Image (tube, rainbow, N blue to C red):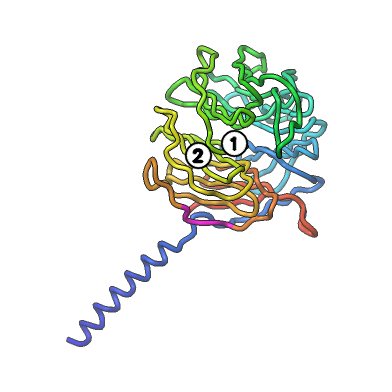
Amino acid sequence: MKNCIAATFLLIFLGLSDAVLGQQSPALTLKNHIPLTNVGGRMDHLSVDVKGQRLFATAFDNDTLEVIDLQASRQVHTIPGLNEPQGAFYDPATNRLFVACGGDGTVKVFDGTTFELLQTVTLDLDADNVRYDPRSQHIVVGYGGEKFLRGKVTRPGGSGALAILDHAGKKTGEIDMDAHPESFQLEKLGTRVFVNVPDKQEVEVADLVKGTVLARWPVSCTTNFPMALDETHHRLFVGCRIPARLAVFDTESGKIVASPSIVEHTDDLFFDPNKGRIYILGEGFIDVWQQKGPDHYERIQRVPTPADARTGLFVPDLEELFETIRHHGQQGEQIDVYETK
């Protein structure tokens, strides 16, 4: 009888231990570092070739785009001579690489294999984020407009815009914004695009077919730069720096339904639709938030990182998060690779 009782308690203890261990299992684990040679300074946004296992990283201060072999975990090519590259998009259907350059307001179109320059599209100052519209199979680029940082106007100007480009790089349309557009997200099941316009402290909602702004949603915090979309639950995630909060919008009503405090100085955030998580890259940490419901979010992990590592890319197909890391002391420029669990 005593042996049975002891065995029962042992099974209960093991079950509880497994549960506790399961709760403590990290959502993000560092997989490896990919060193970048002859690269220095701030890096900006990334794109990926999932089938070809390649990562494309814009090196803003270096005026280059770096091509990384993910299977070999090494840098394999550099595209030089870019003027402050900020955004990139690789189109697997055409094997073309689009790079937006903030310094001269151009979008460079390259062959995805030879990296030969195929086309240069001149927009205006500060060509920035690049997205793909699967409905129209067009490329969307944010550019132009006044930019306001750290309490000062860093570049005067009027309104900004979203430029619509075809696969060849030809400009086929444009949607005017009230100031410089930062991160923006496109619906896959609809025709709306949600655009962060921090100078106006709002999200501007536009229709890609009509080419007009439909609504302007006030943001309760300022310097709203990064953005992600959960289209299934009609939720839009906006990262703010002052104060450091995550503004969660209901995309049907345009109202903020949650605004938890987050890591400081975020510049990129991503939604993981498979796990219902939000990964927020900020100053010194990556915050991992779990979606408990459309209006309820809980931070489940905070991963320490170098202070100025704030840009990256989450790739759902690979279940990996990439973060750019600047040069620090003896540690050179690199990209850290995290696995999601």
Q: How many marks?
A: 2
Q: Secondary structure at mark 2?
A: strand
Residues at circles 1 and 2 in contact by the CB criterion of under 8 Å: yes
* Residue 170 found in image quarter: top right
The kind of residue on which mark 1 rests is: Asn
> Does residue 118 show up?
no
**Camera-nearest residue between 170 and 283:** 283
Which segment did they paint magenta? Answer: 299-303
How would you classify the magenta stretch by its main secondary structure?
Answer: strand
How far is disc 1 from disc 2 in space, using C-alphas? 9 Å
> Does residue 234 show up?
yes
| Residue 165 is covered by the magenta coloring | no
Residue 305, placed above or below residue 82: below
Label annotation for residue 224: 1
Residue visible at 67% across and 28% down in the picture: 97
Q: Secondary structure at mark 1?
A: loop
| Residue 302 is covered by the magenta coloring | yes
Label annotation for residue 247: 2
Q: Position of residue 169 (x, y in %)?
A: 67, 18
Label 1, residues with CA under 10 Å away: few <14, some 14-19, many ≥20: many
Residue 339, placed above or below residue 63: below
